[in-house]
């Protein structure tokens, strides 16, 4: 029997490639960049499995280019706004998987880092030192905001939202959250978290941290009106996906002092950055580092590889999103 063809659209950690290679013939992109559409169409031709990354748009055209033998698309990311799951579902023959759980702690670390960086003005401070700007300690120099006793508003209390809340609680913050569903009472009790409406969360939180997935409902969830609802001394942190925030509206709100600061790990058109953001001292900007630890990326690659192998072997994958019945 011929071995399955497994297409990996960009290099992933070696243990994941090794696992895939035990179970099929792996084609790995030779480029250290996202494939162009044409390259992607060429690469996936005849694939039984496609292991893709968050910058690959997976849609009907890609499914057509792959052909009817395709069995699985494994996204090496928990977020899958890059994938048209309806197109996959409608085929009825292709599984789709993602990588939940393994990047929870790393991403929550970055959310907490951004909370501290924005409230304590750490980006600004670093820029002062690196630009050799003269400075001297004084009682009133570069004062930030303490977070102890302040309220963190979590938008979407999923695994990453919970892990962020856990950290913030350890720093002495009170937790409120909003979302489509109220969390399990045991989780609420552990975090001391109170379920509130989105309006109440925006109007009362000292820090709003976004943890909802990007989809049609959450695109520009934070827009000019929502920013205007936030307190003038509040901060916004985004570690989910850039388009959840209307970036130009955020620039305007930061310029006008409608909110006090923002910490962003993700951007609306990343890797492009809205030039307005670059001019703002009160915006902390980091390049989509949420899951960027050696350990986490290895686990993400391995989970995607395990999903792929399970499906190729006719077994239940660990983390399916679209199933084939
Ligand atoms: C994900 O998995 O969705 C993350 O954004 C990757 O860093």
Image (cartoon, rainbow, N blue to C red):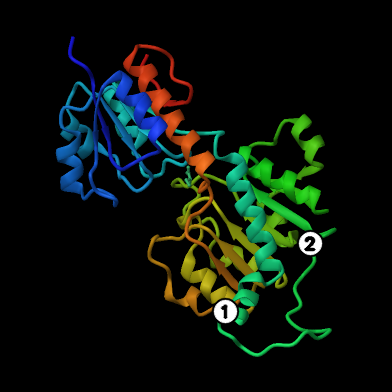
Looking at the image, residue 212 sits to the left or right of residue 13; the answer is right
Q: Quadrant of residue 209?
A: bottom right
Q: Give the camera-side residue of 151 and 290.
A: 290
CA gap between label 1 and label 2 equals 26 Å
Image position of 201 with respect to 309: above or below: below
Image position of 29 with respect to 228: above or below: above
* Residue designated by label 1: 130
Circle 1 crowding by C-alpha within 10 Å: few under 14, some 14–19, many from 20? few
Residue reaching furthest to the top: 1
Q: Give the camera-side residue of 228 and 101.
A: 101
Residue 47: image location, x then y, percent: 21, 27
- Give the residue displayed 19% in from the left and 31% down from the top: 66
Image position of 208 with respect to 60: above or below: below
Image position of 72 with respect to 42: above or below: above
Nearer to us: label 1 or label 2: 1
Q: Give the camera-side residue of 308 and 196.
A: 308
Residue 95 visible to the viewer: no
SS at circle 2:
loop
* Residue designated by label 2: 147
- Give the residue displayed 21% in from the left and 50% down from the top: 36
SS at circle 1:
helix
Residue 217 visible to the viewer: yes
Residue 249: image location, x then y, percent: 51, 70
Q: Give the camera-side residue of 66 and 223.
A: 66
Looking at the image, residue 113 sits to the left or right of residue 176; the answer is left
Tell me: is circle 1 under 8 Å from ligand 1: no
- Give the residue displayed 81% in from the left and 59% down from the top: 150
Looking at the image, residue 112 sits to the left or right of residue 36; the answer is right
- Give the residue displayed 44% in from the left and 19% down from the top: 317
Circle 2 crowding by C-alpha within 10 Å: few under 14, some 14–19, many from 20? some
Please report whichever mark, 1 or 2, sits nearer to the chain's N-terminal start.
1
């Amino acid at each position: 029997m011929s071995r399955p063809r497994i297409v990996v659209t960009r290099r992933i950690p070696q243990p994941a490639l090794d696992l895939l290679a035990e179970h099929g013939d792996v084609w790995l992109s030779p480029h250290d960049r996202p494939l162009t559409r044409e390259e992607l169409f060429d690469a996936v031709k005849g694939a039984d499995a496609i292991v893709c990354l968050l910058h690959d748009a997976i849609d009907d055209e890609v499914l057509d280019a792959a052909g009817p033998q395709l069995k699985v698309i494994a996204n090496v990311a928990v977020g899958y706004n890059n994938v048209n799951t309806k197109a996959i579902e409608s085929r009825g023959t292709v599984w789709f998987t993602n990588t939940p759980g393994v990047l929870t702690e790393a991403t929550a670390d970055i959310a907490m880092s951004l909370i501290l960086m924005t409230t304590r003005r750490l980006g600004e401070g670093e820029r002062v030192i690196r630009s050799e700007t003269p400075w001297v300690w004084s009682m009133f120099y570069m004062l930030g905001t303490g977070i102890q006793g302040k309220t963190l508003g979590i938008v979407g209390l999923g695994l990453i939202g919970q892990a962020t809340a856990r950290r913030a609680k350890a720093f002495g913050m009170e937790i409120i959250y909003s979302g489509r569903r109220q969390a399990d009472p045991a989780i609420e009790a552990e975090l001391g978290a109170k379920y509130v409406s989105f309006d109440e969360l925006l109007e009362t939180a000292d820090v709003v941290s976004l943890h909802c997935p990007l989809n049609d409902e959450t695109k520009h969830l934070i827009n000019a009106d929502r920013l205007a609802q936030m307190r003038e001394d509040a901060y916004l942190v985004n570690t989910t996906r850039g388009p959840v925030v209307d970036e130009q509206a955020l620039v305007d709100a930061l310029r006008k002092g409608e909110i006090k600061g923002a910490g962003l790990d993700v951007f609306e058109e990343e890797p492009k950055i809205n030039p307005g953001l670059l001019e703002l001292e009160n915006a902390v900007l980091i390049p989509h580092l949420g899951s960027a630890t050696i350990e986490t990326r290895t686990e993400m690659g391995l989970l995607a590889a395990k999903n792929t192998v399970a499906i190729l072997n006719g077994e239940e994958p660990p983390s399916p999103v679209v199933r084939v019945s």
